[in-house]
Image (spheres, rainbow, N blue to C red):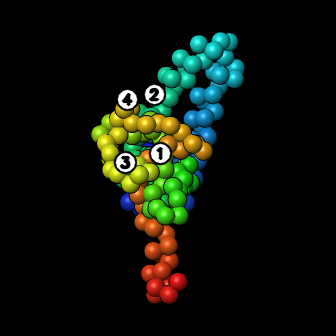
Amino acid sequence: MSTIDYTNISDEEYIEISSRVLASWASKTLEPVIYGSGASRALKDLKKKAAGFFAAMRDHFSREHLNRKRALAIGFKPWSEDAPKLLLIPLWYCGMLKDGQEVVTIGGSIEKYSRETTDHDMRFGVVPFGFEFEDPRKDAQAQDGGRG
């Protein structure tokens, strides 16, 4: 696989690559579940493939390569109208997080992520923490001269 220069890649290119990566990963990891001959074997295969995927893709999906548009395209979801900067992380993305990485909770506090102790309760495909990105309303107001 070739190296991607993230300083020169457009959002559209990032989203296209990410869509292909995620579709390929979903197909490959679900293959043993769909075609496998037993649930325990399929689960072992799934865990093995998931670990390999997270190790290989950790750089591509790292926080430093994400902006609001990219995050939304890979499954992040806005928390609320009252907190427009906070985008909650899809459960699959937790495999990309490193222990100790800072995340923002739905309560607004900054916490260090831990696979063992962080709350992974999922609602609508996302967990109760995420990353903050620039508020798109603020950007629109700046372009509009603050009129709207």
- The answer to whether any part of residue 28 appears in the image is yes
Indicate which disc residue 128 carries: 1
Residue drawn at point x = 47 percent, y = 45 percent: 128
Q: Amino acid at mark 4?
A: Glu
Q: Which residue is found at the position 55% from the left and 23% from the top?
A: 46
Q: Residue at x 59, y 13 (%)?
A: 41
Q: CA distance from mark 3 to mark 2?
A: 22 Å
Do residues under tags 3 and 2 come within 8 Å of each other at their CB atoms?
no
Q: Residue at x 40, y 49 (%)?
A: 105
What's under tag 1, amino acid-wise? Pro
Label 4 sits on a secondary structure element that is loop
Which numbered disc, 1 or 4, marks the residue that appears first in the sequence?
Answer: 4
The mark that comes first in sequence, 4 or 2, is 2
**Secondary structure beneath label 2:** helix
- Say which of 88 and 53 sits in front: 88
Q: Is residue 9 above or below residue 112?
A: below
**CB-based contact (under 8 Å), mark 1 and mark 4:** no
| Disc 3 residue type (three-letter) | Val
- Which residue type carries mark 2? Ala
Q: CA distance from mark 2 to mark 1?
A: 23 Å
